[in-house]
Amino acid sequence: MRIREIWMKNFGRFADRRITVNDGIQLFYGENEAGKSTIHTFLKGMLFGMERKRGRASATDESHLYEPWENPNYYAGVLRFEAGGKTFCLQRSFEKTGRKAELFCEEDGEEFSVENGDLEMLLDGLTASGYENTISCGQLKVTPDASLGTELRNYATNACAQDKGDIDLGAAFARLKERKKDIERRIKIRLEERQKKQEITEQEASYVWTDIHKYIEEKNRISEELALREMGKQKNKKDSLAYTEEVSKWRIHPMELIVFVLLIISPLFIVSKPWNYLMAIIIFLCCLIYIWNRMKVSKRKEKTESEILLEKIRPEEEKASREKLLWEQNRIEAELKEKQTQYENLKEQLEELDLTDDVIERLQQTREAVTMAYEQLEALSGRLREQTDKLLNGRVSEIVCAFTGGKYERLFVDEDTRIYLITEDRKIRIEQVSRGTAEQIYLALRIAAAEFLYEEEFPLILDDTFGFYDEKRLANTLQWLAENKKQVLIFTCQKREEELLKKMHIPYNKENV
């Protein structure tokens, strides 16, 4: 990609400002607050748009900060650039209402859709984050953020897949983590449901077991009562027989009456008169007393009319009461059987709940598969990153060696983009070197990362990046940029870059801001 023209129709302090950009080194010189950072922001806004924030944050967003000084209702610009051997024109409107972007090819008039990703395709997948971490270096922002490490890991995976851009490693890891988290959540919910169901079943079984014991006790009580009634019936029968026997024992026998008559009349024939009558009367009185005593016992055993009536009624009531007890006994036995069956079913349910749940087992298997996939992807990413790191570290080392005049020939960048310098006798963290050296290393990392991540070569955009460089290292850097980069945009408020370019006879173009 090459930038050919910057046209700020109305952007910040600029109105209808056109800037032609050529190949090689392009200097944008201006004093502080001249508008260099405005041009830098305009380039990013044209390529990726400017998102408006809401609420209090809107007062500090770029869209608000760079509103046109005059006529803020007209907020727009044009960027002409080359990509894939063709020239394209990109027009954007940054107004609060009616924001839009139009893109077309100047050579054949073909129109493209920014919203559908045509611009991203022309930019070889360059994102706003990648832009700020590689080809664009703002004021005091030479250090790339952690997202560069993620992009490099994605690059390693995509390079292995030989289909650059199809695999987003960070997104893949995030999806696997989310998938595993979702499975664990579902397992937890399933276990809680099983636990709750088990507690409810156990409680219900406890209630049924209590009912069973109550029915057993009631059944035993009725059985005992029936047994007692049966025993009472047998006792009454025995008492009745005893009573009959007793009555029969004391009743006067006919032979006794005949004997008594013979005894009474015998003195009439044996004893002389008048003593025979007296003797007969005495014998009669004795027999009468005997008979009276015998009949007195019989009268004592006779039952009254009410007792006889009760004897007639009691068997019927006893029969009705016994039938009621038997019906109650049958009812309790039926309900007891039903409760016992219900209890057995509940026991079977509890046994089934103790067994392994098929749903949980499948979820656990899926979780294991997701974990394995995550580990395999992580291992693959590590191996690919090792291969990429060797190439990346070698390229960064070459660039740093050129910037520092050979003082640092080797360095190492880990997976979190932490940088270490390797000397003959020790390993130095980047925090231990000077600010100027650190910024040179970070610039080298940005350049090398851009070469690895994108097939298309992009312009290198540097906004007051060389403030901490000494004269020698600045000269080395400018020399390397002139020899290795096709287009470099340098925004500066100093004149030493121009002086060194002239001194080294390096061609450049200059735009006074």
Image (spheres, helix red, strand yellow):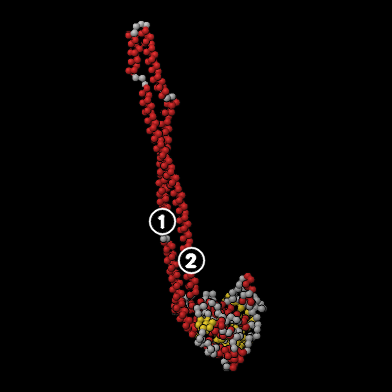
At label 1, which amino acid type do we have? Glu
Q: Position of residue 230 (x, y in %)?
A: 39, 35
Q: Residue at x 42, y 44 (%)?
A: 216
Judging from the image, what secondary structure is the residue with disc 1 in?
Answer: helix
Camera-side residue of 246 and 508: 246
Q: Are marks 2 and 1 in contact (CB under 8 Å)?
A: no
Report which residue position mark 2 lands on: 182
Report which residue position mark 1 lands on: 351
At label 2, which amino acid type do we have? Asp
Work out how far the residue at label 2 is from the one at label 1, CA to CA, in angstroms.
29 Å
Q: Can you name the residue that lies furthest to the top here?
A: 273
Q: Quadrant of residue 357?
A: bottom left
Camera-side residue of 409 and 154: 409
Q: Position of residue 169 (x, y in %)?
A: 48, 75
Q: In front of the other: label 2 or label 1? A: 1
Q: Which mark is residue 82?
A: none
Camera-side residue of 149 and 48: 149
Q: Is residue 510 left or right of residue 314?
A: right
Q: Could you tell me which quadrant the C terminus lies in?
A: bottom right
Q: Residue at x 34, y 16 (%)?
A: 257
Judging from the image, what secondary structure is the residue with disc 2 in?
Answer: helix
Disc 1 residue crowd, few under 14, some 14–19, many 20+, Cα 10 Å: few
Q: Residue at x 50, y 78 (%)?
A: 415
Q: Can you name the residue that lies furthest to the right here?
A: 70
Rendered position, 284 above or below 125: above
Q: Is residue 7 left or right of residue 358?
A: right
Q: Is residue 70 visible?
A: yes
Q: Is residue 121 left or right of residue 335?
A: right
